[in-house]
Image (cartoon, helix red, strand yellow):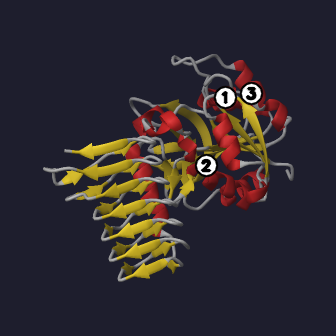
Amino acid sequence: MENLKGLILSGGAGTRLRPITHTSAKQLVPVANKPVLFYGIEALVEAGVKEIGIVIAPETGSEIASTTGDGSAFGASITYIDQTEPLGLAHAVLTAEEFLQDGPFVMYLGDNLLRDGITALVDAFRASRPDALILLTRVPDPGNYGVAELDGDRVVRLVEKPEFPPSDLALVGVYMFGPSIFEAAKAIKPSGRGELEITDAIQRLIDGGKRVESHRVLGWWKDTGQLDDMLEANRLVLEDIERSVDGELVDSKVEGRVVVEAGARLERSLVRGPAIIGADARITDAYVGPYTSIDSGVTVSRAEVEHSILLSGSSVSDLDSRMEASLLGRNVKLSRGDGLPKTLRMIVGDNAEIRIP
């Protein structure tokens, strides 16, 4: 099983992260100043999977391809595969059939983040060679996910968003398949929402007597499809950073685990970690609180920001109150007039200009 390939699904409209995703692919929104998609590519490469296909949608494909490149920056080889319509995960598998060439592969949803990567999953798949291996994690609200019913580690049934969940084990967005998945995906019918569901294809494997095994995620996992999930993923990734101050500090203080990248400049400011300040950012007479990611070229002046993500080129100035739990798009300008309320919480798309009265 040395020729194991990777398939990253990076279509999807990102409707739950609008307006950011009106102008940018949701998989390219950064967490701790790195696009979510890059974490998936790195996880595959770390597991020894270096031949990777990325399924892209017409609306965002060119942006993903130009940002991610041919894969050489990751030590991988990347092929882009067009999925003209979002007709489901099993449809994406069939779209990539020529690239996958009936070989075993790992499928990774491009907006997912797993703290501990997928190396253990890939090793388990190589060792036991089942027809499918799915990744599961315990969740408090299984009715919102695809849920697995197990007999030992063997999967006996999958149910999509069940009213009465058979377990609290939800499917995480990483799957490993042998070649029998292609036949299963071709045999299923579209679901009520008009998609070829991967859970239906896996269930067909189970019903046909194929071996479907499960592997448990012990570290955290996040689907970054919504603002709260994105901020939580940002918080979790920042928990693991190590202090590194390469930028310039002028009458400023940096407390705890903070990354200040080269070219960044802090003047009369306090940054309390975990936080990351990107290259060429300017933080002046400001407070940047924990769990904040400030991307390259961002300006924060006479303002307080906490538990937020500020994308490149944005600026926040003259706020009388603290901005928190917010996501600002690229090149957003946020400033204040008079009479501001005490807390701001926002998701603001690229190139917006907001003046608060």
Residue carrying label 2? 37
Above-or-below relation of 83 to 129 = above
User: Marks 2 and 1, how far apart in space?
Assistant: 20 Å
User: Marks 3 and 1, how far apart in space?
Assistant: 6 Å
Q: Are marks 3 and 1 in contact (CB under 8 Å)?
A: yes
Label 1: state its secondary structure: helix
Residue type indicated by callout 1: Ala
Left or right of residue 43: residue 130: right
Q: In the image shown, does 101 or 347 lie closer to the viewer?
A: 347
Earlier along the polypeptide chain: callout 2 or callout 3?
A: 2
Q: In the image shown, does 266 or 143 lie closer to the viewer?
A: 266
Number of other residues with Cα within 10 Å of mark 3, as a class: few under 14, some 14 to 19, many 20 or more: some
Residue type indicated by callout 3: Leu
Q: Residue at x 43, y 80 (%)?
A: 249
Above-or-below relation of 130 to 343 = above
Left or right of residue 15: residue 269: left
User: Marks 2 and 3, how far apart in space?
Assistant: 21 Å
Left or right of residue 189: residue 352: left
Q: Residue at x 44, y 49 (%)?
A: 230
Report if residue 204 is visible in the image: no
Q: Are marks 2 and 1 in contact (CB under 8 Å)?
A: no
The circle drawn on residue 90 is 1
